[in-house]
Amino acid sequence: MAARIHRETFNASFPWIGALHTPSEDLAYWSEHLFKTSRIWGALSDGNLIGVISLSETWIEQLYVRPGFQHAGVGSALLDVAQHAAQSLHLWTFQRNDDARRFYEKLGFVLVKMTDGSENEEREPDVLYRWDKSGISR
């Protein structure tokens, strides 16, 4: 289910990128990589998974909230769990993802660097953020 939320949310948020992976590849990534290498929390509504976050050491590997449930506190609740579990956090998001950038900055993340996207598989310019529990990000 986490893989489906990932793909549904990604496709809705970034339609210009298109599907880079098949549903079976997404499932393999979650089951063979993320579930083995990171801590994962989910958010439920009426017993259905509506959001998911994956934390590996100090990295937010994935954070997705299903369309229709965004802007309702689900992402904040998931990120709060990660912020309580770590002293500092890092994450990447796309430069064009204005909603996510405002969301992270509102929750204390600071911009560390921007790239041209040449090193990610989407070839989409991205931005690295950092958060520190002390409130001092560098």
Image (cartoon, rainbow, N blue to C red):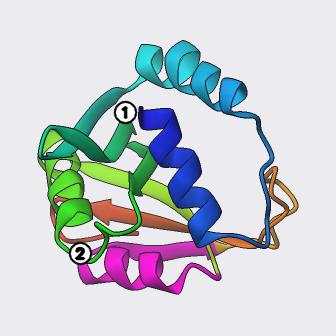
Q: Residue shown at 51%/17% (left/top)?
A: 31
Say what secondary structure mark 2 lies in.
loop
Check the picture and name the quadrant holding the N terminus. top left
Residue 88 picture location, percent across and down: 29, 52
Residue 104: x and y in percent read: 35, 74
The answer to whether mark 1 and mark 2 are in CB contact below 8 A is: no
- The residue that mark 1 highlights is 57
Image vertical order of residue 66 relative to residue 42, above or below: below
Would you say residue 127 is visible in this rendering? no
* Secondary structure type for disc 1: loop
In terms of depth relative to the viewer, which is nearer, 109 or 2?
Answer: 2
Residue in front for this viewpoint, 47 or 121: 47
Q: Residue 65 is drawn in which quadrant?
A: bottom left
Residue 107 tag number: 2
Q: Earlier in the sequence, mark 1 or mark 2?
A: 1
- Magenta range: 96-113
Horizontally, is 63 left or right of 8 in the view? left
Going by the image, does 71 lie left or right of 3? left
Give me the residue at 47% from left, 67% from top: 129
